[in-house]
Amino acid sequence: MKQSSLSLLTLLALAVAQPSLAAEAATAPPASSYVHGDFGPPRGDPIKAFLTEPPKVPAPTYRNYPAKVIVELEVIEKELPISEGVTYTFWTFGGTVPGRFIRVRQGDTVEFHLKNNPNNKMPHNIDLHGVTGPGGGAASSFTAPGHESQFTFKALNQGIYVYHCATAPVGMHVGNGMYGLILIEPPEGLAPVDHEYYVMQGDFYTTGKYREKGLQPFDMEKAIDEKPTYVLFNGAEGSLTGDKALTAKTNETVRIFIGNGGPNLVSSFHVIGEIFDRVQQEGGTKIQENVQTTLIPAGGAAIVEFHTEVPGSYVLVDHSIFRAFNKGALAILKVDGPPDKTIYSGKEVDSVYLGDRSAPNLAAVTQATKAAAAGKLTKEDQIKAGQQLFAGTCSVCHQANGAGLPGVFPPLAKSSLIAAEPKRPIDIVLHGLTGKVNVNGQDYNSVMPPMTQLNDDEIANILTFVLNNWGNPGGRVEAEEVAKVRAEAAKPAAPAH
Ligand code: CU
């Protein structure tokens, strides 16, 4: 046997994969799903499955008989953006996170080919939750780089199912993006809709902080502690915002196949401003109606459907809400069409609420990062990057024009505080500001929390932007100055007496 050197790994993989299997195999399909299924031999010529990358979904099978379907899926390890200016080495089923969407029909006989790209470094396999059989295919599909495995299964149960890699260490393979969805259509097919989309949540663990630039390695300790750096839809912050947002028109029906790859978190999936007319909870056959938020377990999926009435930007979130606004779990469905004032009339959800989370890109931030790395960062680079960052974090209180809110949040425009001490804002951003402060002759007594989630570059750029706008004195804040102030704070406090 050629792969004898891998036998230990194989054993490890199986040892880890087996316990989850028992649980999966134990769920007997409801009798009703057998009744109208056709589990006879496959008919007609074999069909090569057309797989799609997210957020696309393959067209319905439009078949009324069971067929032999050939699925070919290639594992590709590749560096991809995970956030603006941040990359990560993902392990993927087909080159994307989540992996290619597979669509077959209940009763189909699926001949599955798993290929492991020769440039890959790791062995991989696949456990499809829609498979009845040991390991959901994991045991039969363990594949070394440059090899291909084949196994065949009959799709007994209809539903939407997660697939994932189950090679040891399983958590790391899943955490690197190795999951996707397979839809096993009911024999009669799904009801027609105007749009079908494929969205999958996952949690990611990097050694650097959220949005820390550069190539970020996997952090095993954070993963074990279940403290993700990122919680994302479709594998990257901004993968479904701006010009990549999902789209629909008013008076249309939208179906989202929403999965959760985990590896750790469950998702409280919600669309801000919409109500799910129908949900196939946990991908099962029972329909729940009029749902606001539906729970998607790690390694689980659901089908949600709703009708669009009013134009606007609808925000898909994990309603564990810090994940949406501070870890990236946010996507947009843009609905175009005429307004219907009888259903909704008023201001639209807006940039202040979403901040930079819905921004199509933060290109100026990337440009500044690159320039800084090359030692060519100019004041103009900083101002441009700072302007974009300000819009996300600071404008919520200080307002987009720097005017603040009278009596509540002090102005940054023509600020007497900045004019007196142009570098004091570094300390305020890093350590916050509590208690009374007088700006432009008016007292303010609110609390600004420390913004330690911002890195040195970001703070330097934001403050340079502020210094050079709205009648402030100009000048520049450098990342080194910020680092110095941050380090001062890191010193242990003197013992109190
Ligand atoms: Cu793998």
Image (cartoon, rainbow, N blue to C red):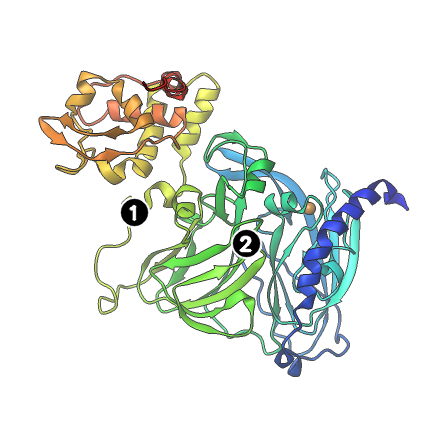
Q: Quadrant of the C terminus?
A: top left
Q: Is residue 253 visible?
A: no
Residue 190: image location, x then y, percent: 54, 73
Identify the mark nearer the N-term, 2 or 1. Answer: 2
Is residue 50 found left or right of 407 in the rendered image? right
Residue 281: image location, x then y, percent: 51, 67
Label 2: how many Cα within 10 Å (few below 14, some 14–19, many 20+) = many
Q: Which residue is the extreme one toward the left?
A: 441
Amino acid type shown at disc 2: Pro
Q: Which residue is mark 2?
A: 54
Q: Is residue 484 visible?
A: yes
Decide: is 197 above or below 366.
below
Q: Which residue is the extreme one toward the front?
A: 497
SS for dot 2: loop
SS for dot 1: helix
Amino acid type shown at disc 1: Tyr
